[in-house]
Amino acid sequence: MPKISIITPLYNGTKTFEETADSVLSQDFENWEWILYDDGSRDGIQELGKKFAEKYKGKVFYFEHENNKNFGTAYTRNRAAEKATGNIISFIDQDDIWYKNRLSHQLEIFRQHQDCAMIWGPALYWYSNRTFVQPVKYNGEDIRTGVYESPRFIEIFLRDLKGTPLPGASLVRKESFIKVKGYDESIRGSEDIVLWLKIAEQFKIYFDDKVLIKYRKHQDSTLGRANQSGEMYEWNLIFYKWVIEFLKKNKASERLIEENEFAYYITAKKIVSKEKYADGRKKLLSKLNSYPELKKKFMKDYFLDLIMPMSIASKVSAKLRFDLLRKK
């Protein structure tokens, strides 16, 4: 029988952790271990994690970084994976909820499709005042249950980022996770997407349309705080640069590469948009100088931003690009 290693990075999650824990402990598949790895929390969740590990010895294991340091989700998940003894890895964040058959349902599909390295499905997006199932689409069409291969899934993961897999709705074979070297620790905020791309590059992936997770959306999440502070934009610059190089290496379509190059430039503009006129343009040029290959492509856009407000320049640039692409 396969063994599943469940991984949860902990970071200031005392408000939601026990509800998440209840959903893990009530799974109808029982051959699992749960690895809790704290990432420098300061709200008491460390004691909560230790309490669960003590109560469920042999099933729940607690770890933390030396000197209570914060390294980020990718680094912490990788360290937890190094502790894993199962041959399948599953993730659940400290604020999400699994349905009772979350593991057993996907595990049965895994058993039938030994050639797939990963399985994933949709989620119920759960806000304080509403819920909805996040659609998983490609070019406006629902993705159907079945096996997918590269490069199709690479395009799916990048064309509609709202449809990309959530860690808590996915299972990954540990040998495949190791082969792609796990999470890229230079990426923050979009580290999941980078992992899926690396897996999709080498392996078959299975999509199943059954909803098995409630994904909590709230302002106190890591991504929520990063979006509020603007830090997410800086993270996204690193992410888009990684994606662009990845797509070029895999000889992806020019349009997909151009879309991500343009996303890089727009993200750089968002970072400097609240600066005064001269300071903003100077910092934007600095961002372009740090990526010379893209600087050549976007100097015309930069000149538009020099002669008019950035918001208007963006609309002009977008219209020009749309008309250009429509003619192709």
Image (cartoon, rainbow, N blue to C red):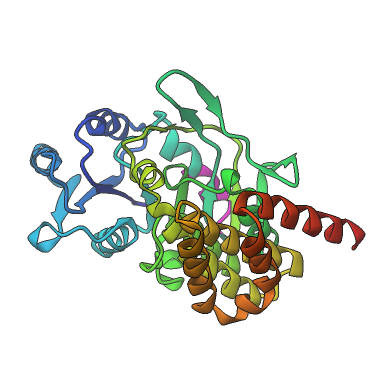
Image coordinates of residue 43 in percent, x first then y, are 13, 39
Residue at horizontal 64 percent and vertical 48 percent from the top? 160
Residue 151 at least partly seen: no
Q: Nearer the viewer, residue 36 or 231?
A: 231
Image coordinates of residue 153 in percent, x first then y, are 65, 57
Image height of 292 relative to 10, above or below: below
Question: Quick one: which residue is furthest to the right in this view?
Answer: 327
Count the marks: how many? 0
Q: Quadrant of residue 197?
A: bottom right
Question: Quick one: which residue is furthest to the bottom in this view?
Answer: 292
The quarter of the image holding the C terminus is bottom right
Image coordinates of residue 231 in percent, x first then y, are 38, 54
Give the overall secondary structure of the magenta segment.
Answer: helix
Q: Nearer the viewer, residue 212 or 322?
A: 322
Image coordinates of residue 299 in percent, x first then y, are 66, 73
Residue 100 at least partly seen: yes
Question: Quick one: which residue is furthest to the top in this view?
Answer: 129
Residue at horizontal 42 percent and vertical 53 percent from the top? 232
Question: Is-magenta flag for residue 105?
Answer: no
Q: Quadrant of residue 168?
A: top left
Question: Is-magenta flag for residue 112?
Answer: yes
Q: Nearer the viewer, residue 110 or 169?
A: 169
Residue range highlighted in magenta: 107-114
